Image (tube, rainbow, N blue to C red):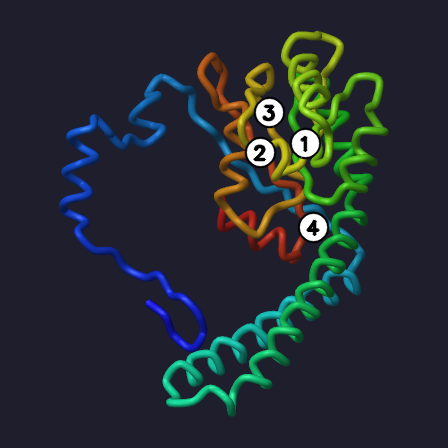
Amino acid sequence: QNTRFGMQAQGATNTGVLASMLKSAGMIRRTKAEALPDLPPKFRQVIEIPHEATSIINEEVKKYETFLSARRRLKRLEFMARKSDTDGAYHLEIERLKAAVMVSFSELSKARHDTAVYKLPTVITHLENALESGKVVVFAHHRDVMHAIYEAFSKKAVMLIGGMNEHDKSLAVSRFQSEPGVRLFVGSITAAGVGITLHASCHVVFAELDWTPARITQAEDRTHRIGQKSNILIQHLVLESSLDAHMAKKVV
């Protein structure tokens, strides 16, 4: 329906008719566990890294609280505006708060980046040890973090990040899957988290996390595909008391 805030599409009509049509066309919904019951299990582990970066963690937490506060104020004001007969009294304040939310989120993103960079040496050491037992897939979010990991293992690593052409993406996957000397796959959670198969490895490491848990699940499932014979070990490397630590515990 049309409102003074624009078109709003909520709810549904004739859902019974739609369900009947889909069933008659042969559409059946199954979960992954139902469709692929023979896949081996996944085991998740959160590894909290002790640190002396108290100021970095405190800054991250502070930026997160500022972001949440601004977003709560915005939601309250938008609710009040929807209940009001006129939105004129609220329009300017809503726009101001939207800008404040964007600024606070940008500052929070920078703080999370600082946290990721700080733990890079520990991540690289962890991967060095993990590679002694077999191939490993590592996911991250920031480009400079992924580049740093790749450069540390460049002779035995491939990388798939956003902006690469399809040929180079396919080549990275193919080399990791087929070449014994290619031991490490460095991937972006978003660019490498869907549509590819990496079952040459049964070990997934997250150097960073994403705000959306579903993206984490999609990324880890690159190894949990048809043809995988081994149990999957998924590790989240996080600094103690960081946002990633809290997020990882919720995912696990």
Mark 4 sits on what residue? 239
Secondary structure of the residue carrying numbered label 4: strand
Instruction: Look at the image and tell me whether residue 134 can be seen.
Output: no
Secondary structure of the residue carrying numbered label 1: strand
Name the mark on residue 193: 2
Secondary structure of the residue carrying numbered label 3: strand
Residue displayed at 67% across by 44% down: 208
Report the Cα–Cα distance between label 4 and label 1: 21 Å
Q: Quadrant of residue 129?
A: top right
Residue 29 at x, y percent in the picture: 27, 32
Quick check: 81 left or right of 195?
left
Instruction: Check whether the beta carbons of the residues at disc 2 and disc 1 lie within 8 A of each other.
Output: yes
Q: Quadrant of residue 104?
A: bottom right
Front disc: 3 or 4: 3
Mark 3 sits on what residue? 203
Mark 1 sits on what residue? 187
Quick check: 83 left or right of 126?
left
Report the Cα–Cα distance between label 1 and label 3: 13 Å
- Going by the numbered disc 2, the residue's amino acid type is Gly
Instruction: Check whether the beta carbons of the residues at disc 4 and disc 1 lie within 8 A of each other.
Output: no
